[in-house]
Amino acid sequence: MTRFISRRLTRLDAIPDEEFPSLMESHLDGWEFAVEAWIHQGKIRFLNISEYVSLGYSVFVPASPELERYRPQITEQIEKLVKTFDIEFGFIHPEYFVTSDSEMYFGEVAYRPPGFKVFELLERVYGFNAYQALILSFDPKTTEEEIHAFFPKEVEDAQGYAGCFGVYPRRRVVSRLEIPEETEDHPYFESHELTAPLQETVTKRTAFGTHWGLVYFRGDEADTLKALLAHQETLDFYM
Amino acid sequence: MTDPDDVAVTEKLALRVERFDEALAAMARTPAFARPGKVPLLLDAARLVLQEEGGCAAMASRAQAFEEAGVFAGSDWATPQILVPSLSRGALRSADAGLVVIESLSQLRLLAIAQGWFLHPLMSSEQAHHYLTQVLALNLELLFAAPGEAERAVQGRLARVPRNLFAYLAETIGYEHVIDQLIDEIWRVLKQRPIQVDSVKDMITQIAVCRARRDIHWGGAGQGADRLVSSLYGPTQATREDPGLEEYQRRLDRMDAPALQYEASGFARAMHDTGLVSPYHAVILRHLLGQGDHLLVECLGLSSTGRDCLLCYSDLVHALIESAVFPGTAQAVYGLALMLERGILYQPPIAPALWRQLGLSLCVSAAERLRHRTDTAITPEARLLEGVLCMMGLPLGIGQGNNPTCQSARALSMWAFNDPDYLLQMVAWAARDDEIVMHFEGQAISSRESAGGVATEVPVDLDPVSLLVVPHLDRIYAEMGRRCVGRDGDPHRWVNPEFHGWWSGRGFHINVDVATGLLHELEDFLRHFYAAYHPMYNGNQPLIHPQPAGIAVTDSAARFIGWHAITILRVSLDPSGTMRVYFYNPNNDSGQDWGDGLVVSTSGCGEQFGEASLPFEQFASRLYIFHYDLLEYGEPAQVSQEELDRVMGYVHRSWGRERLAAGGLQAEG
């Protein structure tokens, strides 16, 4: 399969005919976030907003207070989705963009757990196992009491903020893994799941393709975490 | 008053310990099947703790908790009783953080066992203590030497982990235990008379440094250290206080003949005692060149054989000392002495071949490979000559280093032992022409035109001759293997005789079916081996030529590790009347524990320097390939069934355990 990324519509002409039929996806510029919503008996039981710092690089939960301000509007949108798809039990994971004029655009919706280990991040701050939550909400026999006992209160019950950063080597040729000292020494740093490089040459990154592993952070301040996650993009993890 | 920096350090450590405790608790909560997924996070959290000062103590106190949480489950570390101390070297120097950390955690766990508060089901406190002292002794440079460039380049900040670990272990166990163990270890290695003694010299230097430190309490330890330290730094009256090379030369200039003789014999004693040569020895040997050959004989510690040889080839010996013996290449003295003792100069081609070596101009790439990395005063030519003398004097002292090139090391050793003229020819080709051509079934194979060898990296940790010749041999050996692709059976059948020399037998037996890897006609194999090699079954014929053979190496738990190339040197009765096979193992340390009671002996059972030995039965049980002379060969031996059953028992309990054919399994019941 070939992948193309184009910023201009005219470049589509450059794609040779034999590449069609092809699957196209448009990328919008804007502030992007995702939602994870557990639904039981047609009602939203837990709604998380995952805030992206840089799309494809970093995400954290719960969202910063600036984004959480939109929670009522976001909840309305999700309720529309639940109604449209007639979801009684289950879980959805939609994505949205907020553009510079504060307009919220629907991106896509998935009926599956999110990527970037968001479930693990949720467990770090709320303490519940999000996979277990899936099973509970998909099961019509789960009682109202069980649901109430299981889910914490969004944002209020969160112990700080948890985020992760997807490492992609910045150099073309790498030989070893070395976590930057400032990353490791930061009080928010928790752990990483990077492994020593198996190949020396780094393949060119296409779209938001495969990172080499995640680095986990947790702390009390959303702003600090956000800056920290953004800063990781300027550091070398592979030398 | 508390230093604010200390507070910061303690807080950082406390935070990291807290993170580790969280990871540990999460792992303990996880059901066993899902735990492997949690191990990397736990190890990384442990790494952050161990990198901090005081981190080792924090982890040691949690030893029982992390072992019981399953951090070692499913790995060799889960059975500490089989861990091999020497493997810790590689693990602790690895660039893989996970490996460094799990090895460190394992040692802290053993410390808890040794201290007696963690009762381990598989290991006693004494065993743990013994293991840790060995590990410390083997890694002494981590305690005392500054981190080398290599360590930094490979490990970066990770290098703090093994260093913190060793400082903590040594403080807790006590330096005096380390030193005694280390001294025993050095003597054990030296009895095998390796050519490569750099690391031994380094360890002795560290002992000397430790002894000079006042803050280390020695207790009654270190009794055997004097001979080792003095052999390098002060073997004689006039060098006792390590005066420095220039001062020693001034002292020599003022000595009369009896004083010189006294010095000379002191050096000779130290050298033959330990196999190590002091740089002062090189100074006096050069000084004695103008003083008459009887002093040279004294200084080399020669017997009548060596003396005759020296007097016969006086000019050549003078020229060799002139060109090869310098303080930086002092081991050449020992090589020269043993070469003279072997009498090989009486073989007609050797002396002219050595004259060629003396005048040989090295090609650019050879000179580059031989350039000493730290001591620029040593010329590549002198270094190569030192290597040649050592190889001619100590054919069984060649080691393969940390490289998969056992066949090449074995070939060099066999030539130095059996055909030294051919070895000198090889060295000349490699050093002058940068090419070696060998023939395989009539077709020429050039080392230059052959593609890759067995080793993927250029070896660096070798003696000078190996450094130069092994890359060529390795490529040729691999090419010979490639030419056998598609033939039925094991390629060693054809490659070994063509590669090593006419004397390696064309008759060939193997007890493993190449296609399936299963044992194949084991009893028949053994009967033929007894008939060809055992003096009681082959008409009491001592082995004439060294023969290549293949063994299945097993670890201390008798599990199969891999195939390995060795040379069978002789089979004879040892001083206690046991029939033993004496062999050469290109591995750097032949004294290995192969499990199930097989411990390879390197001294005390009639071995000569560099030989390894096992009782015949035990050796036969690890053998999988041997060669023999088709024409000198009798009937399969009428060995008693009980004896064969014992050998096969050893096979079935070790590397043969998973290689039994379906029928064999049933027979096992």
Image (tube, helix red, strand yellow):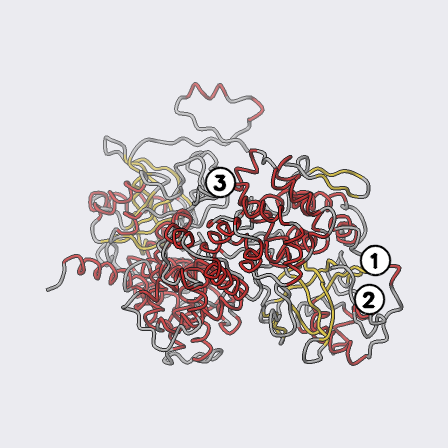
Nearest to the observer: residue B558 or residue A80: B558
Same chain for labels 1 and 2? Say yes or no: yes
- Residue at mark 1 to residue at mark 3: CA–CA distance: 46 Å
Which residue is under mark 1? B507
Q: Secondary structure at mark 1?
A: strand
Callout 1 amino acid: Gly
Residue at the spot 65% in from the left edge and 62% down from the top edge? B304
- Residue at mark 3 to residue at mark 2: CA–CA distance: 51 Å
Q: Secondary structure at mark 3?
A: loop
Q: Is residue B96 left or right of residue B516?
A: left
Callout 2 amino acid: Ala
Percent of width and height locating residue A141: 42, 65
Residue at the spot 77% in from the left edge and 72% down from the top edge? B664
Q: Is residue B495 above or below residue B162?
A: above
- Residue at mark 1 to residue at mark 2: CA–CA distance: 10 Å
Nearest to the observer: residue B45 or residue B50: B50
Which residue is under mark 3? A200
Label 3 is found on which chain of the structure?
Answer: A
Mark 3 surroundings within 10 Å by alpha-carbon count, few (fewer than 14), some (14 through 19), many (20 or more): few
Label 1 is found on which chain of the structure?
Answer: B
Percent of width and height locating residue B426: 68, 43
Q: Is residue B584 left or right of residue B494?
A: left
Which residue is under mark 2? B532
The label nearer to you, 3 versus 2, is 2
| Residue at the outermost left position | B1
Q: Is residue B207 left or right of residue B337?
A: left
Q: Is residue B394 above or below residue B432?
A: below
Q: Secondary structure at mark 2?
A: helix
**Residue B534 seen in this snapshot:** yes
Q: Is residue B609 left or right of residue B167?
A: right
**CB atoms of marks 1 and 2 within 8 Å:** yes
